[in-house]
Amino acid sequence: MRMGERVEWALHCCFNLGFVGPDVAVTAARLAAFHGLPAAYLNKQLQAMARAGIVESSQGPGGGFRLARSPQQITLMDVVTAIEGPDPAFRCTEIRERGPAGMWGTSQRACTIDAAMRQADLAWRRSLAGQTVADLMATFQNTYPAMPDRIKDWFTTAHA
């Protein structure tokens, strides 16, 4: 399964908003600047996450994005689904029913390849559903103890 960079961007936004905390809204431009991303394109990903209930947005002075739920309640699968959609990674088009193979009667049973691919898809979805943004934050904090405070400071102080 290949996920686009939009998933990486969205996860980093959740990660950073988790460290900033629920009391501070961060603009899309500010989130984009932190990783050198195009703000307009990142804003589209943030809007997709808002529609999925992962982040919430507020308008006006002091407006921006914040997590809509605690980091413990946001799974990696929630973010992937918000950005990439709910469709399975593999879609069987039943090519076994075409050409000479179509006459051999194999289509009376489930496609062996489709079954294997669905099993793999389910495994990675379960793995992502079993990990939360809070899990990532904890791993990061254990590896880089000073960084969460630095991230929060960067987002909550004015920069020229």
Image (cartoon, rainbow, N blue to C red):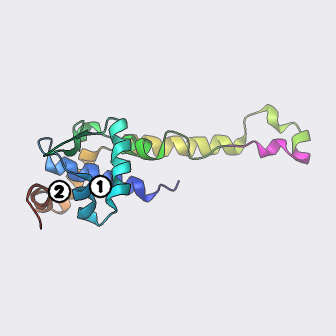
Q: Is residue 142 left or right of residue 96?
A: left
Residue 154 can be seen in this image: yes
Circle 1: is it few (<14), some (14-19), or many (20+) Cα within 10 Å?
A: some
- Tell me residue 87's x, y (percent): 54, 40
Res 12 label: 1
- In this rendered view, identify the residue nearer to me: 16 or 76: 16
Going 87% across and 41% down the picture, which residue do you hit? 102
Tally the marks.
Answer: 2
Res 131 label: none
Going 91% across and 47% down the picture, which residue do you hit? 100
Q: Mark 2: which secondary structure?
A: helix
Residue ranking furthest to the front: 60
Going 77% across and 33% down the picture, which residue do you hit? 109
- In this rendered view, identify the residue nearer to me: 44 or 19: 44
Q: Mark 1: which secondary structure?
A: helix
Does the magenta segment cover residue 146?
A: no
Residue numbers of the magenta segment: 92-101
- Tell me residue 141's x, y (percent): 17, 56
Does the magenta segment cover residue 96?
A: yes
- Tell me residue 15's x, y (percent): 25, 51
Quadrant showing the C terminus: bottom left
Going 33% across and 51% down the picture, which residue do you hit? 43
- Tell me residue 44's x, y (percent): 38, 49
The three-letter amino acid code for the residue at tag 2 is: Gln
Q: Is residue 52 left or right of residue 121?
A: left
Corner quadrant of residue 57: top left
Q: Alpha carbon of mark 1 to alpha carbon of mark 2: how far?
A: 14 Å
Res 141 label: 2
The three-letter amino acid code for the residue at tag 1 is: His
